[in-house]
Image (tube, grey):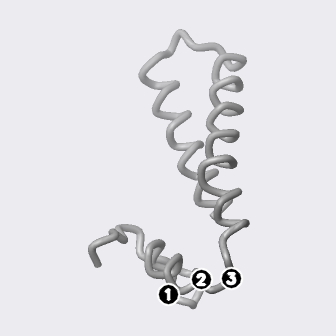
Amino acid sequence: MHRHNRSVIDAELRRLARRAPSLSPADLDVVNTALGKVAESAILAPLRNAPRNTAILLTHIFGHTGNGSSRSNATLND
């Protein structure tokens, strides 16, 4: 999940840099730090603290196939 969060944040930073070229690297660093903190508190920490028996549900939600790959378009309605 950490790698997935990081790839999403990196993609959003690239998109933001294209849409707002006046932002400096320092500005983008501030946004990067803020998004990292949000991901940690809203996603990663709760997953770390989830009971072990929720692994099956998390696997279904995130579409993990068990072979190192995942479905990129997984939805909650699958």
Quickly name the residue at label 3.
52
Q: Image check: 17 left or right of 28? A: left
The residue depicted at 59 percent of the width and 82 percent of the height is 55
Q: Amino acid at mark 1?
A: Thr
Question: Considering the image in quadrants, where does the N terminus appear?
Answer: bottom right
* Residue 54 percent coordinates (x, y): 58, 80
Marks 3/2: CA–CA distance: 6 Å
The residue depicted at 58 percent of the width and 52 percent of the height is 7
Marks 1/2: CA–CA distance: 13 Å
* Residue 21 percent coordinates (x, y): 50, 15
Q: Give the structural element (helix, strand or loop) at label 3.
A: helix
Task: Please tell me which residue lies in front, 40 or 72.
Answer: 40
Task: Please tell me which residue lies in front, 49 or 30.
Answer: 49
Q: Amino acid at mark 3?
A: Arg
Among numbered discs 3 and 1, the one appearing first in the sequence: 3
Quickly name the residue at label 1.
65
* Residue 16 percent coordinates (x, y): 48, 27
The residue depicted at 41 percent of the width and 69 percent of the height is 72
